[in-house]
Amino acid sequence: MPDLRAAVIPVTPFQQNCTILFDEETKHGVVIDPGGDLDQIEAAIEQLGITVDMILLTHGHIDHAAGADQLREALGVEIVGPHEDDKPLLDNLETQGAMYGIAGARNVTPDRWLSEGEAVEIAGQPFDVLHCPGHSPGSVVFVNKLAKFAIVGDVLFRGSVGRTDLPGGDSDALVQSIKAKLFPLGDDVSFLCGHGPGGTIGEERRTNPFVGENAQGFA
């Protein structure tokens, strides 16, 4: 997958990594998790010269999804994902916005929910869908096995994992998602996540303090 490129735009007060994943040659791509600050996202799309084919959501928390409906309206594209178990979160974005001071948050219903075993096409490349609950009930991860690359949302971070103290969070489910679905992808798989720098599966398997080989757990 030599022509696939990623542009990461930190948005909202939570500095969430909205990612534009696109083909450098065709200039077609997707916007992943437009949580807000749409002026910055739209400026990046214009600067890169990208034709956006769809909006992907990894899960339903406000910093990932609050701007999705407005961006769908502006671009005339579909919203795909996450898993339907996050519907209560997406139905409550306006309330969350008022709580966290994020202006313009809109409730959103995706055009298509995603399930384990499905695939989505990103910039002409197939990405498998993994349902990875724990951070939220409907969190999904997108994996291109040939490219050894994944978009993991807030399931896994470099040196950390997604928080599980929010509504619908489940620490046991999160650990199971990471150990049973992400670690088997292979140590050489690199990932982009929802906050902070990306990493590799191998580094997290070896050193992550929550789920790595010498993990101390969530205590």
Image: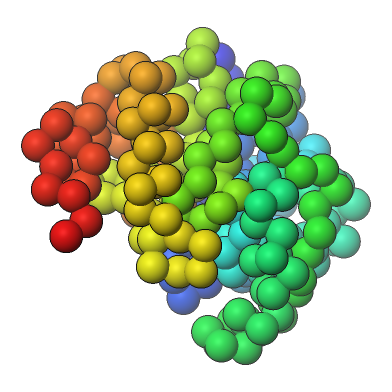
Colour scheme shown: rainbow
The residue positioned farthest toward the front in the image shown:
172
Q: Position of residue 44 (x, y in %)?
A: 62, 53
Quadrant showing the N terminus: top right
Q: Taking 76 as reference, is 119 above or below it?
A: above
Quadrant in which residue 148 is drawn: top left
Determine the residue positioned at 21% across, 56% down: 218
**Percent x, y of residue 170:** 42, 55
Figure check: 62 above or below 56: below
Task: Classify the position of the C terminus by image quarter.
Answer: bottom left
Residue at image coords 45%, 69%: 166
Kindly identify the residue that appears in the image at 62 percent across and 81 percent down.
Answer: 97
Q: Position of residue 55 (x, y in %)?
A: 73, 47
Question: In the rendered view, would you say 210 is above or below 101?
Answer: above
Left or right, residue 136 beside residue 33: left
Q: Residue at x 72, y 38 (%)?
A: 114
Q: Residue furthest top?
A: 146
**Residue 43 in the image: x percent, y percent?**
66, 59
Residue 164 appears anywhere in the view? yes
- Image-quadrant location for residue 42: bottom right
Q: Is residue 130 left or right of residue 194?
A: right
Q: Is residue 43 above or below residue 157?
A: below
Q: Nearer the viewer, residue 170 or 26?
A: 170
Q: Is residue 6 among what the camera can see?
A: no
